[in-house]
Amino acid sequence: MGISKVHTLYDAVAKFVHDGDHIVFGGFTTNRKPYAAIYEIVRQGRKDFIGEGGPAGGDWDILIGAGRVKAFINCYTANSGFSNVSRRFRKAVEKGAILFEDYSQDALILMFTGAALGLPYVPVRLMLGSDLVEKWGISEEQRKKIDKLPDEKFVIQEDPFNPGQKLVLLPTPKIDTAVIHVQKASPDGTCRIEGDEFHDVDIAIASKHCIVTCEELVGNEEIRLDPNLNTIPGFVVDAVVHAPHGAHPSQCYNYYDYDAQFLKDYDIAGKTDEDYDKFLAAWVYGPKTHEEYLNKLGAERLIKTRVVPGLGYAPTK
């Protein structure tokens, strides 16, 4: 049977998320973001994170808005279709409240792949000719003060196989904890992601610790019945948390659509400090557990986001 890795959400965060950790979340902007875990991280007071955002949305915007992020490496932060740029993220950068570094999206995804392969860096031609190689958001001096950041944003060198051509050597992240939401997981940590996997497999493999929240907790024997559908092997997962609707308000393919009204309300709340504090009080600090959060949302609201089989999205009235 093997050792069960099933944890409560509280225990998983308490055990595997620490102040100052280098953290990465799975999903993509409004897709399969591990919001239940993010709310719990905020409730437990964890802080001073080095965030590796990738294609981020409200996940990192919440942590930044709650003042929990020290440095943020990113390519894009917005709830697609609801905000051009996440408001708390933008304000923190404009005020200088966080250290911020920008890479292109394809570069960041390749950095995650390189980390999963155990490589110290990945050589690319991406970003050459753009100001992404001309401007550094985090200086070399600032980087040397943070041991979880590489001393340089990148290194440009000549291609040893094609003299006269240049390569950008991108450092791979040293991830302490990855947090991922999936459709199905078993007690031994085996995960099944339905639909696009995004960068989730790479960060699960690359991280020292991996927390998985899931819509359905199924038996180890059940998930092995069709192993070709499984995505993340159990040996890279440290904690499995049963958290139905754990990606709300983002969507979870084959299960529920994003909550459009919630994302609209979140965007409006982000306009002022006062309104944002009210949002955190109502939806993050107010509910003490994920179950209380779901009860606050209400059954009718959750039912309305259920996808229609064959369509893949929820109908609107």
Image: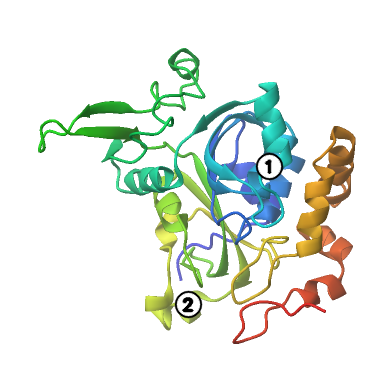
The amino acid on which the numbered mark 2 sits, given as a three-letter code, is: Ile
Residue 155 x/y as whole percent? 30, 26
Name the residue tied to disc 1: 61
Quadrant for residue 313, please give it: bottom right
Q: Name which residue lies at 83% across and 51% down.
A: 283
Residue 188 x/y as whole percent? 48, 65
Task: Identify the element where label 1 is drawn.
Answer: helix
The amino acid on which the numbered mark 1 sits, given as a three-letter code, is: Asp
Mark 1 crowd level (few <14, some 14–19, many ≥20, 10 Å Cα)? many
Relative to 2, say whether 288 is above or below.
above
On-image quarter of the C terminus: bottom right
Name the residue tied to disc 2: 223
Task: Identify the element where label 2 is drawn.
Answer: helix
Q: Name which residue lies at 48% across and 74% down.
A: 220
Quick check: 18 left or right of 304? Answer: left
- Taking depth in this image into account, of 163 and 315 the one nearest to the observer is 163
Q: Earlier in the sequence, mark 2 or mark 1?
A: 1
